[in-house]
């Protein structure tokens, strides 16, 4: 990470993944899961779904939806989160291409 000073304050440029910047284990996995949960929240808001309605459509329990809305999605896999989006009427696309860097990065793009 690049470090610089702005108005006397030391600032470090982000890598683009806050989890990696903080040294969290499985940072790339968390970044992907977070992106999927953000899309699920948007879908719920756009469709004006309650947690109970969303849970039924996604095939999970309402407490799991509640956990997800509070940022605890450790009990849900990336695959399950993608399935939830599909059940909410969204297509999930996985793209494979040569890496831009030698680091094993996972990227999620929301359209």
Image: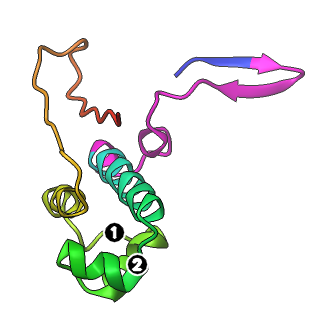
18 lies above or below 37: above
Q: Residue at x 82, y 19 (%)?
A: 6
8 and 46: which one is in front?
Answer: 46
Q: Quadrant of the C terminus?
A: top left
Q: How many marks?
A: 2
Residue 31 figure quarter: top left
Residues at discs 1 and 2 in contact (Cβ within 8 Å): yes
The relative height of residue 58 versus residue 78 in the rendered view (above or below) is below
Label 1 sits on residue: 73
Q: Is residue 62 above or below residue 101?
A: below
Q: Is residue 97 or residue 44 the one in the foreground?
A: 44
Question: Along the polypeptide, which appears first: circle 1 or circle 2?
Answer: 2
- The question of residue 22 being in magenta is answered with yes
In the rendered structure, find residue 67 and report the number of the disc placed on it.
2
Residue 95: mark: none
Quarter-of-image position of residue 8: top right
Residues rendered magenta in the picture? 5-28
Task: Out of 54 and 37, give the one closest to the viewer.
Answer: 54
For this orientation, the residue located farthest to the right is: 7
Task: Left or right? Give the position of 70 relative to 96.
Answer: right
């Amino acid at each position: 990470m690049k470090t610089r000073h702005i108005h006397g304050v030391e600032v470090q440029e982000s890598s683009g993944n806050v989890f990696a910047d903080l040294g969290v284990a499985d940072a790339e996995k968390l970044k992907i899961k977070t992106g999927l949960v953000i899309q699920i929240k948007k879908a719920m808001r756009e469709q004006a779904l309650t947690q109970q309605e969303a849970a039924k459509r996604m095939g999970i329990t309402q407490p799991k939806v509640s956990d997800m809305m509070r940022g605890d999605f450790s009990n849900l896999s990336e695959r399950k989160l993608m399935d939830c989006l599909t059940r909410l009427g969204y297509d999930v696309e996985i793209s494979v291409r040569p890496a831009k860097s030698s680091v094993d990065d996972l990227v999620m793009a929301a359209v």
